[in-house]
Image: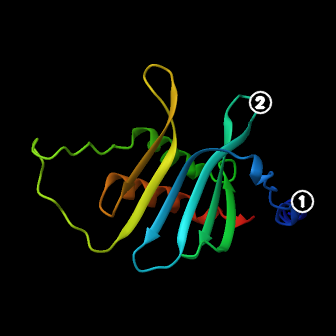
Amino acid sequence: MSGLILALSLAAAAPAARAPDLAKLQVFATLEVRDAFDPTVTRLKMGTFDEDAAGTPTYWFVREQRDRKKRLIRRDVADSGACPGALAPLQAMEQLHLPSPDVPGFGRDADVTVMDGADYRLTGTVRHSDGQDGEFMIQSNVFTPLATWSDDMLRALEGCWRRA
């Protein structure tokens, strides 16, 4: 029993893993969420620093919350080692349903106007079918595949944040 108490005491006293130098984060995607009624803008950077012995990357997440004038309010970090629940929504990003271009006059549906909600913007790197690298940007409002994925990603990280 005393061994168990000692082990628990040592585990509780162990410091949290220190975040590496965030300036060296190799960002592969950035999510930005702006709520229509909240002046705080949340930016989530997703990237890697290194690989473990099996060659699997450790994913790092940096959440910055800024006011509308872009002043930093708070910066937090999380990583996939301490937050394995973030891996499923991260992997789901590759299956994200992309919007189709809308050319007027070719089967265009009626316009849907959303007067409030949130602005979701996801940018990042892509690999084209011919092997070339590129960049993408998807932007949408509420009730879209991007909004659903974004909310799932942020929810998966919710209990994992620590101050940067």
Residue under label 2, please give it: 53
Disc sitting over residue 3 in the figure:
1
Q: Quadrant of the C terminus?
A: bottom right
Local secondary structure at mark 1:
helix
Q: For residue 107, what is the image quadrant?
A: top left
Residue 159 or residue 40, whichever sits in front: 40
Q: Is residue 2 left or right of residue 57?
A: right
Give percent across and percent down for residue 78.
Answer: 67, 57
Find the distance from the CA under tag 2 to the CA under tag 1. Answer: 31 Å
Q: Which mark is residue 132?
A: none
Q: Is residue 67 above or below residue 3?
A: below
Amino acid residing under circle 1: Gly
Question: Which residue lies at the image location 57% right of the left edge and 58% below the top edge?
Answer: 44
The image quadrant of residue 158 is: bottom right
Q: Secondary structure at mark 2?
A: loop
Instruction: Report the amino acid beneath label 2.
Output: Ala
The numbered mark, 2 or 1, whose residue comes first in the sequence reads 1
